[in-house]
Image: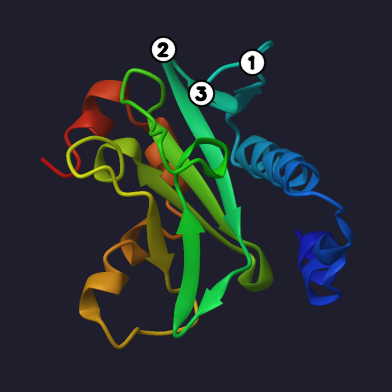
Amino acid sequence: MSTRKSSNRNNDWVHFKTYKQRGEWVELLFMAMAAQHRFAVSKPWGIQAYDVGIEHGANFLRVQVKSTTHRSGGGYRCMFRPRHRVTQTYTLNQLDLFAAYVIPEDAWYLIPATLIVGGDHISDIMLCPIGTPVKKASYCYEQYREAWNLLTRSRLELGKYGH
């Protein structure tokens, strides 16, 4: 972990030429962190809506990995739509959990997909690892910061969040 923190302080992530390269790097970071937390990790072959599979006992979760460096006021804005396309959204039939990485702050958020997908189709959210934001509504995802324990939940249990 100290290597990652050191790397972030040096802003090595700014040297990626494309968002795709940066996204692949963040996926690798997520897989390494999940493995460090003793989860079995798999990478789907071909095109899937999720980036990483997580196995825990009989559970298999589909995780979509996102990242942000976009500072906005007291937090970081993170987009939750496929390939940054406004017209597309994810569905709960495609994934179970989002893993969002605030790169400059070295902070992970593990957020049940039911809180973001469906209903009003939230396309981006504010993550605030640097302090309490002015707008209290922006603080609603802080309970999911470093929530690695959510990877032990079943799809059914994750489906109950936000309902």
Residue 84 position, x and y percent, is: 54, 44
Q: Mark 2: which amino acid?
A: Ala
Q: Mark 3: which amino acid?
A: Ala
The tag on residue 72 is none
Quadrant of res 5 = bottom right
Q: Residue at x 41, y 12 (%)?
A: 58
Q: Nearer the viewer, mark 2 or mark 1?
A: 1
Query: Crowdedness of circle 2 by 10 Å Cα count: few (<14), some, many (20+)?
Result: few
Quadrant of res 38 = top right
Query: Crowdedness of circle 1 by 10 Å Cα count: few (<14), some, many (20+)?
Result: few
Q: Secondary structure at mark 1?
A: loop
The residue that mark 1 highlights is 44
| Residue 51 higher or lower than 9, as above or below | above
The residue nearer to you, when weighing 9 against 120, is: 120
Residue 2 position, x and y percent, is: 80, 65
Disc with the residue nearer the chain's start (2 vs 1): 1
Q: Is residue 132 left or right of residue 18?
A: left
Residue 104 position, x and y percent, is: 67, 71
The residue that mark 2 highlights is 58
Looking at the figure, which quarter contains the N terminus? bottom right
Measured in 3D between alpha carbons, the distance from the residue under mark 2 to the one under mark 3, in whole angstroms, is 21 Å
Measured in 3D between alpha carbons, the distance from the residue under mark 1 to the one under mark 3, in whole angstroms, is 10 Å
Disc 2 and disc 1 in contact, CB within 8 angstroms: no
The residue that mark 3 highlights is 49
